[in-house]
Amino acid sequence: MLLATSSIFKCSLENADEKVGTLHNLLFDDRSWAVRYMVVDTGGWLDGRRVLLAPSVVEQREWPNRRLWTSLTRKQVEDAPPVDADLPVSRQNEVALAEHYAWGYYWGIPPAHPIDTEGDSHLRSARDVMGYRIEASDGDIGHVEDLVLDDEAADDGLWEFRYLVVDTRNWLPGRRVLVAPLWADEVRYGDGGISLRLSREQVKNSPEYTPDAPINREYEEVLFDYYGQPKYWIAHSKAHGSPK
């Protein structure tokens, strides 16, 4: 399902007996735009501490009702190794979390020893990216208003940011468009800018995005054909050996 990231903040994370916390933010890898962690606000029961949880702990999603279901208990979260939910997050922190929750290592191999204690420069905050300036190859075109999340990006519970919602009001008043973050050449965190491999003219004539309308496959077909980009769902189907 494709949905606006801003619409899911403050969703309740619950198990069968109690509320575990509230979704506050998402941390992602800026090389793949895959979501690595949910930042969950534990409210008053754990002194208001924010914790990091992998999206795979979510076993059922009720986005319209703003509820997420997990089998994790408050006790498991309370006993987790302390990690500052603000960036940077070190590999040492990630290993401690993976071992506590038995998530496995998303990077695919056991950690080297000694474990790196430096923060991961590729781990970024979704909230921070909202508002970043968007630059085409020949000038500014707007800013990031939102991110579109794909909560079914893979069979293992992986979430991924599929699109940036670009508000072009400073150049094309009242118009919003979608661009895939993987079409960007560079994300600059120092000055809050994202450079695209697209011209202003391309963006100007691209299919318009309406926030109230669902993003369906028909719209995506038109969007990817317009930009001449390979379609991610076809690559996914080939990788899994079946049509999607």
Image (tube, grey):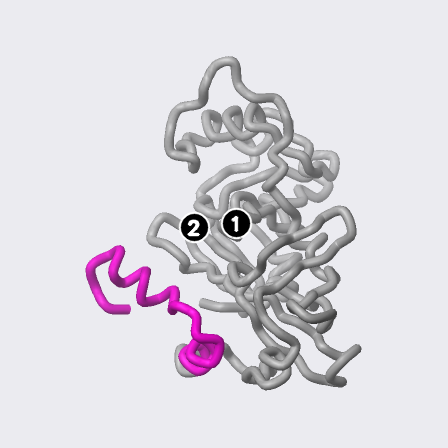
Q: Is residue 199 visible?
A: yes
Q: Which residues are magenta?
A: 219-244
Position of the N terminus, as image quadrant, is: bottom left
Q: Is residue 65 visible?
A: no
- Label drawn at residue 158: 2
Depth check: 150 or 169 in front?
A: 169
Which residue in the protein does label 1 denote?
35
Residue 43 is left or right of residue 66, and the answer is right
Q: Is residue 239 magenta?
A: yes
**Residue at the extreme left of the image, as rendered:** 241
Amino acid type of the residue tagged 2 in the rendering? Leu
- Asked which secondary structure carries label 2, the reply is loop
Q: What residue is shown at x 51% (from left), y 59% (from top)?
A: 182
Position of the C terminus, as image quadrant, is: bottom left
Question: x and y percent of residue 23 in the render?
Answer: 62, 51
- Disc 2 crowd rating (10 Å Cα; few below 14, some 14-19, many 20+) is some
- Asked which secondary structure carries label 1, the reply is strand
Q: Quadrant of residue 51?
A: top right
Q: Are marks 1 and 2 in contact (CB under 8 Å)?
A: yes
Question: x and y percent of residue 226 in the render?
Answer: 47, 81
Question: x and y percent of residue 67 in the render?
Answer: 55, 59
